[in-house]
Amino acid sequence: MSKPLLTALAAACALSVPALAQARQVTLTTQLKNYGGDGAYLAVYLTDAKGAYAGTLWVAGGKAKYYKHLSDWNRLSAGDTKRLVGVTGASVGAGRTLKVTLDLADALIDAGYEIRIDAAAEDMRDSPAEVRVPLATSQAGKPQAGRQYIQTMSFQLP
């Protein structure tokens, strides 16, 4: 290849790569029920179209010894040694709201991915797959009911 052609190719790649890596700020809002117990541990994570673990978005609850109670997330993400880097916070009290804003790659939206939340509270039943919702523009802003601890969960896209 000639130098001008290589230079043009390199310039074209440099301009197109940032377009592929664009992200959107997504805000997740999870309202807990007044279930009458201690603060809940929540694992918010993504799975792909086949149900395989794709990454952890947020974990509410700081004591790792309780993560085994977030059973689906714990099982699916066990090999992900970086699963908790910068994605943890305090547990969420009954009747309280967890609101998290994060950047998600545009390529994940409307591509078959699903947001899942596992929930657990001390001395109460664990609730794997408490909420499951497609990461799709058609689902943005629509509250999804939880099964045991979560009243509603919704996400907003810009």
Image (spheres, rainbow, N blue to C red):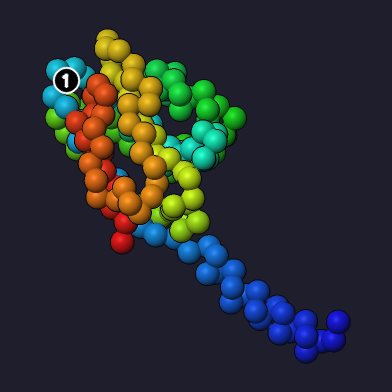
Residue 126, image x, y percentages? 34, 16
In the displayed structure, 74 sits above or below 139; it is: above
Give SS at disc 1: loop
In percent of the image, x 24 and y 46: which residue is there?
A: 142
Q: Is residue 47 visible?
A: yes
Residue at the bottom extreme, as displayed: 4
In the displayed structure, 44 sits above or below 149; it is: below
Residue at the top extreme, as displayed: 123
Residue 34, image x, y percentages? 13, 24
In-front residue for pair 16/85 = 16
Using the rendered view, name the quadrant where residue 8 is placed: bottom right
Q: Count the marks: how many? A: 1
Residue 99, image x, y percentages? 25, 44
Residue under numbered circle 1: 35
Using the rendered view, name the quadrant where residue 127 is placed: top left
In percent of the image, x 54 and y 36: which residue is there?
A: 50
Residue at the right extreme, as displayed: 1
In-front residue for pair 142/125 = 142
In percent of the image, x 44 and y 52: which residue is there?
A: 110
In the displayed structure, 45 sits above or below 70; it is: below
Q: Is residue 99 visible?
A: no
**Image quarter in which the N terminus is found:** bottom right
Which residue type carries mark 1? Tyr
**Image quarter in which the C terminus is found:** bottom left
Describe residue 114's horizontal placement relative to residue 121 as left or right. right
Describe residue 128's horizontal placement relative to residue 15 as left or right. left
Mark 1 crowd level (few <14, some 14–19, many ≥20, 10 Å Cα): some
